[in-house]
């Protein structure tokens, strides 16, 4: 198959490679083949190869995907692949983006857990059947791959926008009954670059490889912010 | 903008959208009902002049539009033009006032 791969940084061009097809071949296999056999200078990123670490995301035929779990069969178009770095993040080199802005926004959305108990206290019991736990379960498996962030139109239009993953993180903490910083967190995500900028295009939900719906989390945050505003806490 | 201000704008936009939705339905339904069998300008004025219920309804309609549209426009100018700060707020306030003024002018033109 023909594989066009982005080479360079913000300025650069596509370079074409011929890569043999294999059964059960993933896009990451293709990139690895190119780097090992055809162009050792190619820069890309991966670690776990099993969909856990979130480091291998790239744009494949125009769509952001986790490449280690994306089979070539599923995405091949006219016997060709076009592989680019993720969108909405600065390119360091070739397929490697600088993800600092993405993770800085998790911090800005107050993505850190802030409990009140110490290691000397007993565990805080949370019933697995509680509705809060169900909401958290729906959003907690995020691997930080930035696929949603790369798919988001609002991030493209407003670079300050916190983005789906950071807001999803904030939502799981707002639902965490042990956490002590709810109002502060709601304030952090209700500002200029927060939930109210979301257009509900749902590209994040469509693309998230972990089938998380950041859109649902954002809607939940809007409700929580509304309640908090009506109570005069915000 | 602050979290509180941003949330207030969001609430204002959602609430005005609900009002607009209702007003638009009533507006269209009444037009369709009223024009059956034809309607002259004189007949229209005969019904609207001095009609306080009519005045109240369309004043609310105009007010909701004057609240709703500038908040939406605000998101557009941020995303498409990157326009922020005082000048943007000034522009939007003038835009809101213009909508309100033109709307109320139209309302009073057939009420008085
Ligand atoms: S929400 Fe989904 S797409 Fe976004 S970073 Fe987490 S796992 Fe990746
Ligand atoms: S390499 Fe870890 S998720 Fe793909």
Image (cartoon, coloured by chain):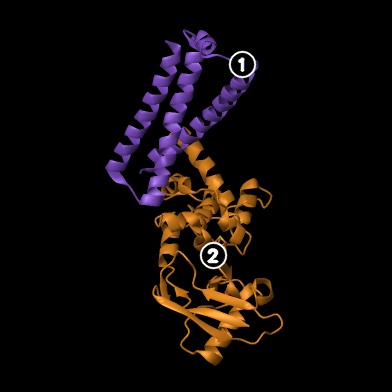
Chain colours: A orange, B purple
**Taking B71 as reference, is A218 left or right?**
right
Q: Label 1's element? A: loop
- Residue beneath the point at 35% across and 29% down: B98
| Residues packed near mark 1 inside 10 Å, few (<14), some (14 to 19) or many (20 plus) | few
**Taking B9 as reference, is A168 left or right?**
right
Residue at the far right in the pictured view: A23
Determine which residue is flagged by label 1.
B38
- Residue beneath the point at 29% across and 45% down: B85
Q: Does any atom of ligand 1 lie closer than 8 Å to the CB of label 2?
A: yes
**Quadrant location of the C terminus of chain A?**
top left
The residue lying toward the viewer, choosing from B6 and A22, is A22
A230 in relation to B109, above or below: below
Query: Can you give x and y, in whole percent of width and height, for residue B3 in the image?
Result: 40, 43
Query: Can you give x and y, in whole percent of width and height, for residue A30 in the image?
Result: 60, 82
Residue at the far bottom in the pictured view: A37
Q: Is residue A191 visible?
A: no
Determine which residue is flagged by label 2.
A147
A26 in relation to B11, above or below: below
Q: Label 2's element? A: helix
Q: Chain of mark 1?
A: B
Q: Chain of mark 2?
A: A
**The quadrant where residue A76 appears:** bottom right
Query: Is the Cβ of the residue at disc 2 closer than 8 Å to that at disc 1?
Result: no
Splitting the image into four quadrants, where does ligand 2 fall?
A: bottom right
| Residues packed near mark 2 inside 10 Å, few (<14), some (14 to 19) or many (20 plus) | many
Residues behind callouts 2 and 1 on a single chain: no
């Amino acid at each position: 198959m023909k594989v066009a791969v982005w080479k360079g940084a913000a300025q650069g061009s596509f370079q074409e490679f011929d890569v043999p097809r294999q059964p059960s071949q993933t896009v990451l296999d293709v990139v690895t083949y190119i780097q090992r056999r055809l162009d050792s200078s190619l820069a890309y990123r991966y670690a776990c190869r099993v969909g856990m670490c979130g480091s291998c995301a790239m744009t494949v035929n125009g769509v952001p995907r986790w490449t280690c779990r994306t089979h070539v069969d599923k995405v091949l178009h006219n016997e060709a692949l076009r592989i680019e770095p993720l969108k909405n993040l600065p390119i360091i080199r070739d397929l490697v983006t600088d993800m600092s802005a993405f993770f800085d926004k998790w911090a800005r959305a107050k993505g850190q857990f802030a409990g009140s108990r110490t290691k000397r206290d007993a565990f805080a019991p949370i019933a697995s059947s509680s509705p809060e736990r169900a909401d958290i379960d729906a959003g907690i498996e995020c691997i930080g791959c930035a696929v949603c962030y790369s798919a988001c139109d609002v991030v493209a239009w407003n670079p300050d926008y916190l983005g789906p993953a950071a807001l999803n993180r904030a939502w799981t903490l707002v639902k965490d009954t042990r956490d002590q910083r709810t109002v502060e967190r709601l304030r952090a995500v209700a500002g200029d670059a927060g939930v109210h900028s979301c257009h509900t295009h749902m590209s994040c939900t469509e693309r998230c490889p972990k089938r998380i719906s950041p859109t649902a989390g954002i809607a939940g945050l809007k409700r929580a912010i509304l309640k908090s505003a009506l109570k005069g806490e915000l | 903008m602050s979290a509180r201000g941003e949330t207030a704008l969001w609430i204002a936009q959602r609430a005005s959208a609900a009002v607009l939705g209702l007003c638009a339905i009533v507006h269209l339904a009444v037009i369709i009902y009223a024009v059956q069998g034809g309607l002259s300008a004189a007949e229209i004025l005969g019904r609207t002049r001095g009609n306080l219920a009519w005045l109240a309804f369309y004043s609310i309609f105009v007010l909701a539009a004057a609240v709703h549209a500038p908040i939406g426009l605000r998101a557009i100018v941020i995303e498409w033009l990157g326009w922020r700060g005082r000048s943007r707020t000034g522009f939007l306030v003038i835009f809101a006032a213009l909508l309100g003024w033109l709307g109320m002018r139209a309302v009073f033109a057939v009420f008085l």
